[in-house]
Amino acid sequence: ADGPLAERVVLVTGATGGLGRATSLGAARAGAMVVLLGRKVRPLEQLFDEIAHGEYATPAIFPLDLEGATAADYAGLADAIRQGCGRLDGIVHVAARFDGLTPLSHVEPDAFLRTLHTNLAAPWLLTQACLPMLKAARDSAVIFVLEDADEIGRAYRGAYGLAKSALPSLVSILHAETDRTPLRVHGVRPPPMATRLRARAYFAEDRQNLAAPDRCAEAIVRLLGKDDGALRGRILDIPAADIAVS
């Protein structure tokens, strides 16, 4: 495969959702071998076929429900990538769980913990399992998809709001601990996008006025392949001048 991500292996979580699908396709077009992670096998197979028919690098499929994943699952994922791909150059954390607007007092304890795990614990534990491969790469990147701070702190966002509010701190801490390694850490805040997840909170919104996920995916693909120390550890808003890199 040819392109700015040629010979790189990139893992995309939530690969079959709106932004995950756009990112997976964008990374494949840029030359990467994409590891597609998602909950359901059939949508993963459909995305696999779409990438394979485009004559890009053959992707890999890894079905995993992050909601119930354990440390052994993350270790198994890392081992499968190591054995099947031989390397890992990037992770894009797109997977998310949001059940809709609910007062915190009405959220069942089990649902609260599952949401925290999917949106906060899982991205870190998965990254932790893959850190040896990421640090062994010449130039690697981990990208966390964030939410607008003002919106996510509003009422009824529940455990999803709490988890997403903590992710910028994870970006900052991980960056501080890896700044002298080949691993780059980035946070990306997309604009309001026409996705099923957003529709659960803004069900009356006119989707025609929202951005397509492809725009943010293009920015993410640039970050995956750009070795620029100035962008390390930063929270980048889309669209913004910071992301308009050539």
Image: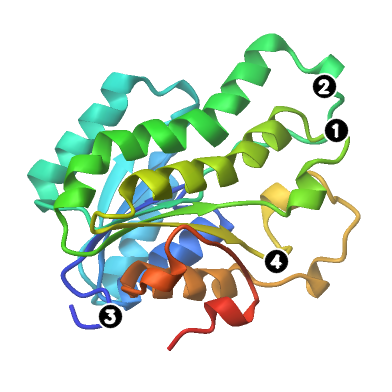
Q: CA distance from mark 4 to mark 3?
A: 25 Å
Does label 1 or label 2 sit earlier along the sequence?
Answer: 2
Q: CA distance from mark 4 to mark 1?
A: 20 Å
- Above or below, 185 against 37 in this view is below
Residue 207 location in percent, x, y?
80, 66
Q: Are marks 2 and 4 in contact (CB under 8 Å)?
A: no
Q: Quadrant of the C terminus?
A: bottom left
The local crowd at label 1, few if under 14, some if 14 to 19, many if 20 or more residues have their Cα within 10 Å, is: some
Q: Which residue is mark 2?
A: 104
The local crowd at label 4, few if under 14, some if 14 to 19, many if 20 or more residues have their Cα within 10 Å, is: some
Q: Secondary structure at mark 3?
A: loop
Does label 1 or label 3 sit earlier along the sequence?
Answer: 3
Find residue 193 and report its image quarter: bottom right
Question: Is residue 230 shown to the viewer in this render?
Answer: yes
Q: Secondary structure at mark 4?
A: loop
Does label 2 or label 4 sit earlier along the sequence?
Answer: 2
Q: CA distance from mark 1 to mark 2?
A: 6 Å
Q: Which residue is mark 3?
A: 4
Q: Quadrant of the N terminus?
A: bottom left
The image's colouring method is: rainbow
Residue 103 location in percent, x, y?
87, 25
Find residue 238 and report its image quarter: bottom right
Q: CA distance from mark 2 to mark 4?
A: 25 Å
Q: Which residue is mark 1?
A: 156
Q: Secondary structure at mark 1?
A: loop
- Which residue ends up furthest to the top in the rendered image? 109
Q: Are marks 1 and 2 in contact (CB under 8 Å)?
A: yes
Does label 4 or label 3 sit earlier along the sequence?
Answer: 3
* Residue at image location 61% in from the left, 51% down from the top: 146
Q: CA distance from mark 1 to mark 3?
A: 41 Å
Does label 4 or label 1 sit earlier along the sequence?
Answer: 1
What amino acid is at disc 1?
Answer: Tyr
